[in-house]
Amino acid sequence: MLTDLIIKKFAIIDNLHVAFGSGFNVLTGETGAGKSIIIDAVNLLLGGRARGEVIRTGEDEATVEAIFNLGNNDSLQEKLLAAGLSGGDELLVRRIVTRAGKNRIFVNGSAVTLSQLRELTSGLVNIYGQHEHQNLQRTETHLELLDNFAELQEPLAIYKQAYGAYQQLQNELQRLNLAERERQQRLDMLSFQQQEIAAANLKPGEDVELERERSLLQHAEKLTAATVGGYENLYAGQQAVCGTIAAVAAQLEALEQIDPHLGSLAKSLQSNLYNLEDVASELRDYSAKLDFEPQRQQQVEDRLALISSLKGKYAPTVVELLEYKEQITAELNDLNDIDGRREHLQRQLENQRELLLSAGKQLSCQRKTAANELSRVVGIELTELAMAKAVFTIRLLPLSEPAINGLESGEFYLAANLGEDAQPLAKIASGGELSRIMLALRRSIPTGDGVGTLIFDEVDAGIGGEAATAVGEKISRLGKLLQVLCVTHLPQVAAFADHHFLVAKREDYGRTTTELTLLQQETRIGEMARMLGGTRVGQQTVEHARELIVSSRTLVG
């Protein structure tokens, strides 16, 4: 619901802030007062075209803002989340137009693009009149309106599920039915890759072990010198450390009876000697295992180079190389068994097509029945809206192939006058006719496309008397379900409003400004009297205005 509209430096509006209420909001005023400007401003917030000439004379930029109460609009909350925008109970939209041609658009304080603005506001407001936001002129919405009228959401969901499964099978079969040349090329390539990886005879962790071995081979001389030399110095040499320590320990032990402390030191040396002998033994064993064949280093280097090459081509680790080999094998099996798989998928596709057509035919049958009923109901509504000679029909045309929304397309047709051939509604309806047809549809399908705010412009064009009263009553009843804004020149329509706004011009210091005022009881009666009597308003006209308001309340309860 549109709760607040703020307009600054836009056309002849200087600074305007209006709070709209729920139900039926009517805007009235003399011709040229600026009623259409207000609708133009709303249209701008819905992604309409921005022109520099809308900026007030003497100003550099114009700003239009709106606050929408979102209620339980989960769909819009999801769109906000997907766009990375903050959600909440309200949506603040602001658009700034500059003379330089630059547009700045903000939603909940974050900058967005024009296409994002259109996407986010597409489900908030519909304007019916001479404006771009004409959902009724978008034929793709006609089938949706029909389905909503007949409450076909469940059979449509069943059909769409069958269609999704059918599409998936089609895609799989299409992927399988590659051109034979492409398939053979794929086979050749995968066979080569499989053979190349298989020939390497890889083992998990092999590259790590080879890297360690290469490091040993690269430092062979150092390792040999350290281990062999260490053994010699510690144990085997003529002046080996172990021999020297053993001799010292023996001397100290011989003097133990003279000084027991020397005996203690001898035991300490002997203990350390055992440790050194163990180290020497390990160095000897280690050096004995060292076998540095020159050709082995080259073998390791070649093996690592091969593994590195395979990693660069197919996968970053040996484990992933082996996994990739398994994937190749599976795909090769599929490609080699393509005829069998094709036959299997073809049978599945045929079975799914039967299910799809069955669900589609059931949906089509329900749509045909609903189309006749909707045409009848809308026809009744149009008769009461001074379009008694108009013939409204819904044409369902079969498609050559099943589509996402069914086996047929749907489009509204209208023969506006007696004896005329019906033509596509999107091409022939005038603004006033379009507004009345949408009013008739909205009366027939209150929930429509889920949009919560409707703006009617020129809905009363070319009508008066009882037809005008019927228009007012229908809009009022529609306002019990949705928020409605309506620009009108007819007092019979304005009498039904829940909130009556007067659009008027005033002059200050040589400048013209449009103002919007919410009328209370007596001021409202005065505006109604003006609409009834023009410049000559007497007491009788005032009483007539009062009676119109009272009688309208009686009609809608």
Image: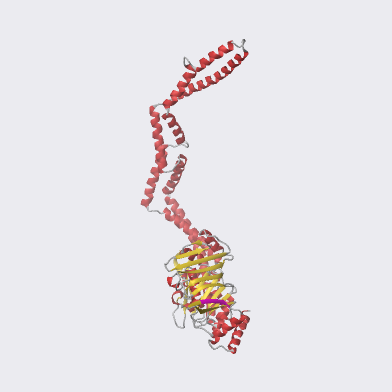
Q: Is residue 392 visible?
A: no
Determine the residue positioned at 44% across, 29% down.
216
* Residue 242 falls left or right of residue 199: right
Q: Is residue 166 visible?
A: yes
Against 123, residue 288 (above or below) is above
Residue 545's x, y, as percent? 59, 85
Quarter of the figure with residue 301:
top left
Quarter of the figure with residue 201:
top left
Q: In which quadrant will I find the N terminus? A: bottom right
Against 223, residue 413 (above or below) is below
Residue 350's x, y, as percent? 47, 59
* Residue 162 falls left or right of residue 184: right
Residue 538's x, y, as percent? 58, 89
Q: In which quadrant will I find the C terminus? A: bottom right
Count of labels in the image: 0
Range shown magenta = 514-518
Residue 214 falls within the magenta-colored stretch: no
Determine the residue positioned at 39% across, 37% down.
306
